[in-house]
């Protein structure tokens, strides 16, 4: 009885167990099961959906991005997706992209992706500068003018990064 299974009555549960029903719907104990009807749960989330295929490839027409999103194309043009380039959301969205797509997004949107790895100055948009510490195998875009960075965030960097940032920006990372 399908109706009995949905309501979880004992007769339906026993019947499924006896037959070893492999198609049984199991809901995980942690998390929220998502379906097509659950899209409205994430309206305020920075990445509601991934819209891919916005760029024309191999003679196929690209799918236009929804209003407010920009088509970002990977360097080899084999992947494209729509990205929110608004200043409010870009910093959250770009951090979820792989290196290739993040680099393309920085250039398509004209914005720096904060708190992510940069490999050279091409990864940062002015006034940000790519500070690289080879010993830490890390580089990060830093704004020499940011009060927030120099008052708080700079402390999260390693010593080598702080030294390089201080020299490049002619500023000091404030002590707590």
Image (cartoon, rainbow, N blue to C red):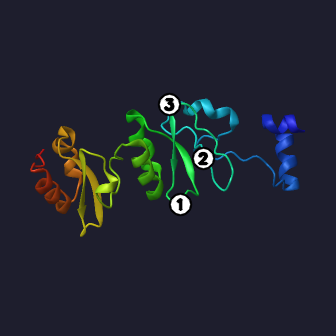
- Marks 3,1: beta carbons within 8 A: no
Mark in the foreground, 3 or 1: 1
In this view, the residue in front, 95 or 51, is: 51
Q: Residue at x 13, y 50 (%)?
A: 169
Tell me: 152 left or right of 64. Answer: left
Q: CA distance from mark 3 to mark 1?
A: 32 Å
Image point 25% across, 68% down: which residue?
Answer: 134
Across and down, in percent, residue 27 comes to 68, 45
Q: Could you say where residue 51 lies in the image, as x and y percent from the top left?
A: 59, 43
Q: How far separated are the C-alphas under marks 2 and 3?
A: 20 Å
- The reply to whether the C-beta atoms of the residues labelled 2 and 3 are less than 8 Å apart is no
Residue beneath the point at 68% across and 39% down = 35
Describe residue 127's horizontal placement relative to residue 6 as left or right.
left
Residue bearing the label numbered 1: 76
Displayed quadrant of residue 31: top right
**Mark 2 or mark 3, earlier in chain:** 3
Q: Disc 2 marks which residue?
A: 52
Element assignment for label 3: loop
User: How busy is the neighbourhood of tag 1: few (under 14 within 10 Å), some, or many (20 plus)?
Assistant: few
Between 85 and 88, the one nearer to me in the picture:
85
Quadrant of the snapshot with the N terminus:
top right
Tell me the quarter of the image containing the C terminus: top left
Mark 2: secondary structure: loop
Q: CA distance from mark 1 to mark 2?
A: 15 Å
């Amino acid at each position: 009885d399908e109706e009995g299974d949905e309501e979880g009555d004992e007769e339906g549960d026993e019947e499924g167990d006896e037959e070893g029903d492999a198609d049984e719907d199991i809901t995980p104990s942690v998390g929220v099961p998502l379906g097509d009807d659950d899209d409205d749960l994430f309206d305020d989330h920075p990445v509601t959906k991934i819209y891919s295929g916005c760029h024309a490839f191999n003679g196929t027409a690209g799918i236009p991005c929804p209003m407010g999103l920009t088509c970002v194309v990977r360097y080899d043009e084999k992947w494209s997706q729509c990205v929110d380039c608004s200043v409010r959301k870009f910093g959250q969205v770009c951090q979820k992209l792989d290196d290739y797509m993040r680099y393309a997004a920085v250039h398509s949107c004209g914005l720096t992706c904060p708190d992510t790895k940069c490999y050279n100055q091409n990864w940062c948009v002015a006034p940000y500068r790519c500070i690289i510490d080879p010993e830490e195998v890390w580089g990060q875009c830093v704004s020499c003018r940011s009060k927030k960075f120099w008052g708080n965030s700079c402390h999260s960097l390693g010593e080598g990064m702080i030294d390089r940032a201080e020299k490049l920006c002619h500023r000091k990372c404030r002590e707590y």
